Amino acid sequence: MSRAKTISKARVETITQAVITIPPDIKITQWIAMLSAIVSFTLLAYYLRLYPVLLYGWYINEFDPYIRLFMTEQMLKYGTIKGLLWWLHKGYGAIFTHFWYPWGANWTIILSPGVSWLGVLAYKVLSHLGFDLLQSVILLPAIANAAVVPAMFYLGYRLGGKYVGLLAALWSVFTTMFLQRGTAGWFAAEPIFQFIATLGIAFYIESLIRKDNYWILFAVLSAIINGITTWVWGSYVFLWNFYGLFTIIVLLYLLIRIARRQSLPFTIDKLVITYILTDLGSQPLWR
């Protein structure tokens, strides 16, 4: 190797090893700007999702939300805790002929209890602000679905950095994937599930990429959040299968890196433990 090439290589290594330090005041300014953007996106999301109330008034959208409202009323007859226990005991064999007349249906067997029970909790809270049951369950989908904006920022941030997080948050404000089933009045599983699923995936990724011992905490949080999904969304099995497929693909990626004698971004045991915890948390215990 010539002397010129040696000097050039030394300069490149010196530049590469140099640590670029950002002054603390600039870091604080950046995070204040990002926090302001996230708050602005979230408020805009709330406005868009609550706009149907401003435009049309208080109404329940489509058919399924009426069933959810009806079952919320049934749970309220027993109370917050006893109402949930009533559902878990399959409504004590009750047959509701208000829908699918004249045969009726036992909705405690057909539906997951989470949406109606969250409707009860929303009413218990919002009633102190002067809202009745109908208004509370109309507001709940918009409130829950707008929360997907900071959750999407968190997911994007852990996957690709703060700018990816900002773009993901901005996308979640306007995308029809959320707006079609996340506006006020859509008292069903989708607007709540979209927030919970996003947060659960973010915790799963956080558990894998963390370098400290707190990764296990986020694995547990992923298990808890995904466990809530089974209580809310009857088709939770799609998300359940996603975690299985994602974990298999990542495991194959790690094995390929091992075969090539390359360093691993995280250990296989961390991946397996995180998946097992999430899988156990996703068991439908209410069935």
Image: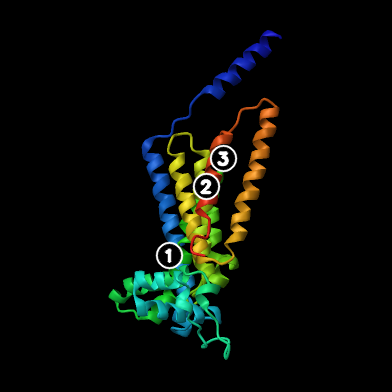
Q: Secondary structure at mark 3?
A: helix
In the figure, 43 relative to 101: above or below?
above
Tell me which corner region of the image, top left, top right, bottom left or bottom right, holds residue 160. top right
Q: CA distance from mark 2 to mark 1?
A: 27 Å
In the figure, 38 relative to 3: above or below?
below
Q: Which residue is mark 3?
A: 271
Q: Residues within 10 Å of mark 1 (few under 14, many from 20)?
A: some
Q: Is residue 256 visible?
A: yes
Res 43 label: 1
Q: Amino acid at mark 3?
A: Leu
Res 153 label: none
Q: Which residue is mark 2?
A: 204
Residue 188 on image: x %, y %:
51, 73
Q: CA distance from mark 3 to mark 2?
A: 9 Å
Kindly check if marks 2 and 1 are in contact, taking CB atoms under 8 A apart as contact.
Answer: no
Tell me which corner region of the image, top left, top right, bottom left or bottom right, holds residue 147. bottom left
Q: Residues within 10 Å of mark 3 (few under 14, many from 20)?
A: many
Residue 198 on image: x %, y %:
52, 56
The colouring scheme, among rainbow, by chain, secondary structure or one colour, is rainbow
Q: Quadrant for the N terminus, please.
A: top right
Front of the two marks 2 and 1: 2
Residue 58 located left or right of residue 127:
right
